[in-house]
């Protein structure tokens, strides 16, 4: 008895010969270990965050010049015996920082600052190792999603450049007979600025990998362009303020004027243009550098309020919350900055000020990301 055929079944077409429906371009690029790579990036994020904090402590404790040589490989080992310690101390005693500022130091005092700098450099090596192990693991296993190899390789290249810039910075302070007791402030700003750039890329990549390619492509259609542009402007403004903050830290300008809102009883600091040539004052005059940092802080807060008010008009609850978080962090950062000044920048408060700058930077990036790729929600405020 003949078997009954189903409605619309093609007569005479074998089952194996029927075409397989292929997914579209929108589904491509979802392969690879997106979740695992995202976890790896989050580990790198945590390490870079700690690196920035340790770098801040190294600067605030005047420890950055305690190691006078750049030995990327052999420098991983600290002094192992008394002879090694005496050798390192003898090298430090030859530079101006010891001769001019720290000639009172004994070996025990030197060891305290040495460990800060060694820890900072060692953490840099750990970050490089974690990046290399993760990158080549995913690369050799062919688990990197389409289009992501160059992005992840960029992180390694920037990390390598950061190591070289770190030594370029330290070398500016290792002098004999020049009377130099600190690294060049503009080199310190370059070093810190690149750290924030690296952290920014890691944050952006982590946010992107947290959602599928299909989701991102659909969300991009609802991009809030004006809000995205304002968030981008705020991001650049905050970055500029971070660089100026590095100049303040580089010359200890936060410890020169400890009154607020005035500076030694007046709006504009005295002796703001004492150095010659005049351009040096913008990098090396504590009064002028701190004044610029203060004024930029006020302007950043004002612009942040404008961006926040625009962000509150977003049609997406997650985006509105992201801009609320930015505003809260920005207001707290201003208060903490004033506190840092009033207490003459003690290490623990100054480190909190720097750490909050990282938090603010990440929150601005997240608000900007959600402006470009909003999360769709139902009328009840939940994801569809």
Image (spheres, rainbow, N blue to C red):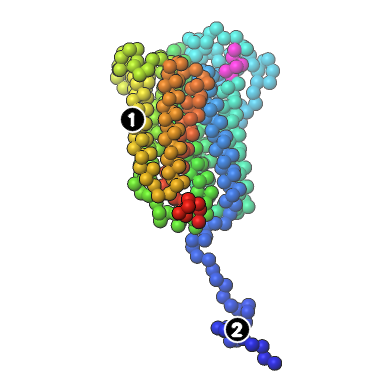
Q: Considering only order in the chain, which callout, 2 or 1, is on the residue closer to the N terminus?
A: 2
Q: Secondary structure at mark 2?
A: loop
Query: In the figure, is residue 31 to the left or right of 274?
Result: right
Q: Residue at 53% x, 8% y: name it.
A: 103
Q: Is residue 133 left or right of residue 156?
A: right
> Which residue is found at the position 40% from the left and 49% from the top?
315
Q: Is residue 200 visible?
A: yes
Where does the image place residue 124, in percent across and percent down from the top left? 57, 32
Viewport quadrant of the N terminus: bottom right
Residue 317: % across, % down: 45, 47
Number of on-image labels:
2
Q: Which residue is mark 1?
A: 299
Front: mark 1 or 2: 2
Seen at 52% across and 37% down, the residue is: 159
Q: Secondary structure at mark 1?
A: helix
Decide if residue 187 is in sight here: no
- The front one of 291 and 161 is 291
Residue 44 or residue 228, whichever sits in front: 228
Residue at left offset 37%, top offset 45%: 313
Magenta-tinted stretch = 109-114
Most extreme residue toward the bottom, as rendered? 1
Q: CA distance from mark 1 to mark 2?
A: 73 Å
Q: Residue furthest top?
A: 104
Marks 1/2 in contact by CB < 8 Å: the verdict is no
Q: Is residue 359 above or below residue 62?
A: below
Number of other residues with Cα within 10 Å of mark 1, as a class: few under 14, some 14 to 19, many 20 or more: some
Q: Is residue 263 magenta?
A: no
Identify the residue position indicated by label 2 in the image: 6
Question: Where does the image place residue 182, in percent across and percent down from the top left?
Answer: 46, 18
| Residue 92 position by quadrant | top right
Point out residue 321 in the picture as x, y percentages from the top left corner. 45, 42
Q: Main secondary structure of the magenta part?
A: helix
């Amino acid at each position: 008895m003949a078997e009954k055929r189903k409605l619309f079944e093609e007569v005479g077409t074998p089952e194996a010969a029927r075409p397989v429906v292929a997914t579209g371009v929108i589904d491509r690029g979802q392969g690879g270990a997106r979740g695992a790579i995202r976890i790896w990036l989050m580990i790198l994020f945590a390490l870079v965050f700690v690196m920035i904090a340790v770098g801040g402590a190294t600067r605030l404790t005047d420890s950055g010049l305690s190691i006078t040589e750049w030995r990327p490989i052999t420098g991983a080992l600290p002094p192992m015996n008394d002879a090694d310690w005496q050798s390192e101390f003898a090298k430090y005693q030859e530079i101006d920082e010891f001769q001019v500022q720290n000639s009172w130091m004994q070996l025990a005092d030197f060891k305290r600052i040495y460990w800060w700098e060694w820890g900072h450099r060692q953490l840099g090596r750990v970050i490089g190792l974690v990046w290399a192990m993760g990158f080549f693991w995913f690369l050799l296993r062919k688990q990197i999603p389409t289009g992501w190899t160059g992005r992840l390789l960029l992180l390694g290249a920037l990390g390598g450049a950061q190591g070289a810039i770190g030594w370029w910075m330290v070398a500016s302070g290792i002098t004999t007979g020049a009377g130099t007791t600190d690294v060049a402030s503009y080199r310190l700003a370059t070093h810190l600025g690149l750290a924030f750039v690296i952290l920014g890329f890691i944050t952006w990549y982590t946010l992107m990998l947290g959602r599928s390619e299909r989701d991102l492509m659909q969300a991009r259609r609802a991009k809030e362009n004006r809000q995205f542009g304002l968030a981008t402007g705020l991001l650049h403004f905050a970055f500029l303020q971070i660089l100026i903050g590095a100049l303040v830290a580089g010359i200890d300008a936060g410890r020169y004027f400890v009154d607020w809102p005035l500076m030694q009883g007046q709006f504009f600091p005295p002796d703001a243009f004492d150095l010659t040539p005049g351009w040096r004052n913008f990098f090396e005059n504590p009064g002028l550098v701190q004044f610029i940092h203060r004024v930029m802080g006020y302007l950043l807060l004002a612009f942040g309020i404008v961006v926040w008010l625009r962000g509150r008009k977003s049609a997406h609850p997650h985006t509105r919350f992201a801009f609320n978080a930015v505003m809260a962090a920005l207001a707290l950062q201003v208060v903490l900055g004033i506190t840092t000044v009033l207490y003459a920048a003690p290490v623990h408060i100054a480190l909190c000020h720097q750490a909050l700058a990282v938090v603010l930077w990440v929150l601005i990036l997240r608000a900007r990301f959600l402006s470009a790729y909003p999360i769709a929600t139902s009328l009840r405020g939940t994801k569809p």
